[in-house]
Amino acid sequence: MNKEEQKTFEALKNGSEETFKKVYEDNRLKFIHFARKYQLSEEESIDIYQDAYIVFYENVTLGKLTALKSTISTYIFSVGKYMIIDRLKKNKKTIDSELALSMAQDDSISVEALLEGETTLTQEQMLLQKFFTLLGGQCKKVLTLFYYRGFNIAEIMIEGGYNSENVVKSQKSRCLKQLKELIKSNTAL
């Protein structure tokens, strides 16, 4: 977390309603854009964002969240992502392997801490988590940025210092294939 982000978080912990409103507004459209890949309606995305933001707000105001290992946006998006997955399960929508991959967590943040221990991982999530850790550093980074953080190909190109979007697409494809092969070869009986 950079100094500006830390300053914002301190203002939130001190109860600044103005800062809470700014954080809400700054992340709302980003989250709706992020949620599009889960094929939810805009209304559902807004509802989930509001619910995720309420979790964040309550955790800060009740003193449950006293420090962050990630950015504020990452925290809110992580809570929202798990709410999206729950919504999809309740709506009985199928979750394909790419959607399941988006549930692989970044090493820098504890999902259990986000949800105060209320979530247990499914068998598929545990497999993804286990085999995701076996990938190389570049693969972890690309897949984490795309599926977990919601970056698009152009943003990954900039973040990772790649020369072109095609290189990023190719890297992402190879890494995804490698992860799928790891899971398939180690779970086939």
Image (cartoon, helix red, strand yellow):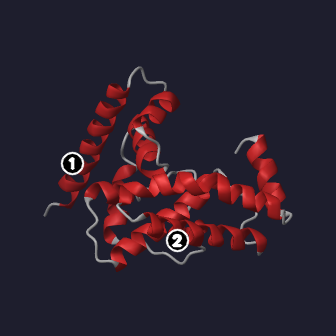
Q: x, y (%) of residue 107?
A: 52, 51
Left/right of residue 59 with respect to residue 50 in the rendered view:
right
Left or right of residue 20, residue 32 in this image: left
From this viewpoint, is residue 105 visible?
A: no
> What residue does disc 2 label?
47
Secondary structure beneath disc 2? helix
Residue 104 lies in what quarter of the image?
A: bottom left
The three-letter amino acid code for the residue at tag 1 is: Glu
Q: Nearer the viewer, mark 2 or mark 1?
A: 2
Residue drawn 53% across the image and 60% down it? 78
Nearer to the camera, 135 or 75: 75
Please name the residue shown 54% across and 58% down the image: 77
**Circle 1 residue:** 181
Q: CA distance from mark 2 to mark 1?
A: 36 Å
- Residue at (47, 53) in percent of width and height: 34
Position of 85 relative to 150 (above/below): below
